[in-house]
């Protein structure tokens, strides 16, 4: 059962620990085997819930949704790579080796360290730090990239990073009252970890910083980001990282032990441990990693790292997002030609298009059957949103029962597609086992699609209340409520009227 707000004192500190790529299947297996004592203790004092992610199901979009309670359409962080139509260029938040080859490393670092929190993150999407600090609640950000807050600090840019990226030695970073960011923002006595230590953006460093915040009573809200799990899951596959999950449990146990014992940790503080997405197995056959810049027969995509779509020689821009790809076309003719080609790619699971008047079209390349839908209408999803739909609900494995659409293998798909980035007029998702790339594979695990394996993560909470079927966008409202603050009003494709059990507006029929 979710814990009730009466269970916990609103003055207690609250920890939000984000475990990148937290996989509920592995979590359940290792809890069952009693190998996760810290997490088991938190669950014994609260709840373990399955939570749905946003779409595309990649780290920057999900982290921004956790930090703001908004969908990617609302918060403006459109993908790990996305086409910025205002600047006519690709934005990337991943300093992969090919960014050095394509000469875009400096741009990528500026996008991560500056633009992400300034020009990309919508002003209307207030972060948890902005909301809590405005209410007088001292907050700490530990190694979390979506840090926008009321304070500016001058970060030290490591020499090699500054040289490779033509960056200044010091750079202003926005954050809450307490802000730690690996080697860039660290306590004066702590030694830098350097390039081999991922500049301190690691679980080990985040744990040390968090213990410091607790022991020095630096903040009432502490957000700690643990990135290691996702990196290992990519490398070994999502069910092959049990040992790495045990290490994460030990780290979380060390953070809890900063209060004394596990019991002290749950008596003296409140805790949320959440993932942002999960991963599915990929590979095992030739060609599973599709280099999207080489996959078109008759169309010329803007190459990764180049600029200019309108008026240039290119037919489209395509941004690979692991197990999905965001496509931007300059006109309707190019869009139709892109659709014709993409429907022949063996890697494509679903082709999703934006249409006029708020409609979305979802197509299965195998059958060419189509589902069209838009927010608000006679159909209800299981989380209280309502929808107008036409065509075959099987395209998203929706299972109608009365006027309610139950989820199948594409959880919360209507809401997630409706909240997907408006910079893409087409999105493709990858079939199980496949991925879309810039030419470098991630290994044995990946994420990004609408399928359940990528999309369902876990929330563990002790002393904080969640809905029974939470989305990751419910984390911010739960935190505000836990501090006695008002939840933000959102129109996330939910009707303000009938929820589950409410009266449908009319009797829906399907062709
Ligand atoms: Zn990842």
Image: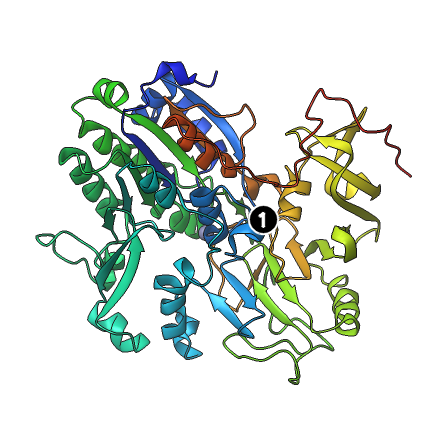
Mark 1: few/some/many CA within 10 Å (<14, 14-19, 20+): many
Classify residue 285 by image quadrant.
bottom right
Q: Is residue 90 left or right of residue 34?
A: right
Tally the numbered discs.
Answer: 1
Residue bearing the label numbered 1 = 55
Q: Image quadrant of residue 215?
A: top left
Q: Residue at x 28, y 24 (%)?
A: 11
Where residue 486 sits in the image (x, y, percent)? 45, 31
Going by the image, does 391 lie left or right of 479? right
For residue 306, side relative to residue 4 (left or right) = right
Residue 371 in percent (x, y) is at: 80, 46
- Does the image show residue 424? yes
| The one of 218 and 255 positioned closer to us in this rendering | 218
In the picture, the quarter occupied by the C terminus is top right
Q: What element carries label 1?
A: loop
Look at the image and name its color scheme.
rainbow
- Front position in the image: 114 or 454: 114
Residue 150 in percent (x, y) is at: 31, 51
Q: Residue at x 34, y 18 (%)?
A: 8
Question: Which residue is situated farthest in the right direction here?
Answer: 511
């Amino acid at each position: 059962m979710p814990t009730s707000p009466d269970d916990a004192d609103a003055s207690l500190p609250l920890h939000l620990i984000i475990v990148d790529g937290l996989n509920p299947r592995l979590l359940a297996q290792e809890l069952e085997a009693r190998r996760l004592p810290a997490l088991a203790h938190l669950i014994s004092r609260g709840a373990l819930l399955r939570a749905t992610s946003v779409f595309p199901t990649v780290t920057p979009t999900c982290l921004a949704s956790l930090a703001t309670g908004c969908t990617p359409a609302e918060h403006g962080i459109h993908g790990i790579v996305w086409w910025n139509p205002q600047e006519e260029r690709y934005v990337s938040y991943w300093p992969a080796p090919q960014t050095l080859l394509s000469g875009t490393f400096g741009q990528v670092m500026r996008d991560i360290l500056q633009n992400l929190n300034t020009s990309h993150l919508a002003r209307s999407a207030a972060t948890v730090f902005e909301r809590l600090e405005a209410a007088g609640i001292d907050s700490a950000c530990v190694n979390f990239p979506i840090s926008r807050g009321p304070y500016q600090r001058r970060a030290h840019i490591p020499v090699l990073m500054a040289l490779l990226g033509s960056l200044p030695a010091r750079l202003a970073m926005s954050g809450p009252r307490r802000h730690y960011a690996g080697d860039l923002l660290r306590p004066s006595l702590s030694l830098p970890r350097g390039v081999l230590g991922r500049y301190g953006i690691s679980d080990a460093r985040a744990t040390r910083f968090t213990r410091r915040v607790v022991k020095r009573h630096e903040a009432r809200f502490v957000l700690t980001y643990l990135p290691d799990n996702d990196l290992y899951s990519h490398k070994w596959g999502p069910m092959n990282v049990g040992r790495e999950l045990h290490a994460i449990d030990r780290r979380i146990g060390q953070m809890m032990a900063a209060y004394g014992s596990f019991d002290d940790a749950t008596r003296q503080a409140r805790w949320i441990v959440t993932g942002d997405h999960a991963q599915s197995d990929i590979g095992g056959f030739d060609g599973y990693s599709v280099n999207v810049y080489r996959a078109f027969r008759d169309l010329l995509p803007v190459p990764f790292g180049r600029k200019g779509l309108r008026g240039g020689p290119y037919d489209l821009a395509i941004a690979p997002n692991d197990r999905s790809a965001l496509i931007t076309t300059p006109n309707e003719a190019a869009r139709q030609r892109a659709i014709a080609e993409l429907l022949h790619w063996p890697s494509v699971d679903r082709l999703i298009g934006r249409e006029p008047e708020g409609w979305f079209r979802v197509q299965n390349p195998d059958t060419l059957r189509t589902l069209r839908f838009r927010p608000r209408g006679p159909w209800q999803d299981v989380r209280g949103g309502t929808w107008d739909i036409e065509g075959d609900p099987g395209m998203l494995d929706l299972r109608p029962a009365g006027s309610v659409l139950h989820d199948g293998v594409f959880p919360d798909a209507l809401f997630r597609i409706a909240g997907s980035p408006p910079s893409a007029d087409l999105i493709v998702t990858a079939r199980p086992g496949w991925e879309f790339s810039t030419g470098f594979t991630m290994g044995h695990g990946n994420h990004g699609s609408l399928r359940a394996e990528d999309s369902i993560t876990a929330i563990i909470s002790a002393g904080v209340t969640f809905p029974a079927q939470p989305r990751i966008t419910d984390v911010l409202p739960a935190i505000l409520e836990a501090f006695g603050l008002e939840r933000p009003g959102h129109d996330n494709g939910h009707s303000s009227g009938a929820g589950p059990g409410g009266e449908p507006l009319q009797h829906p029929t399907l062709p």
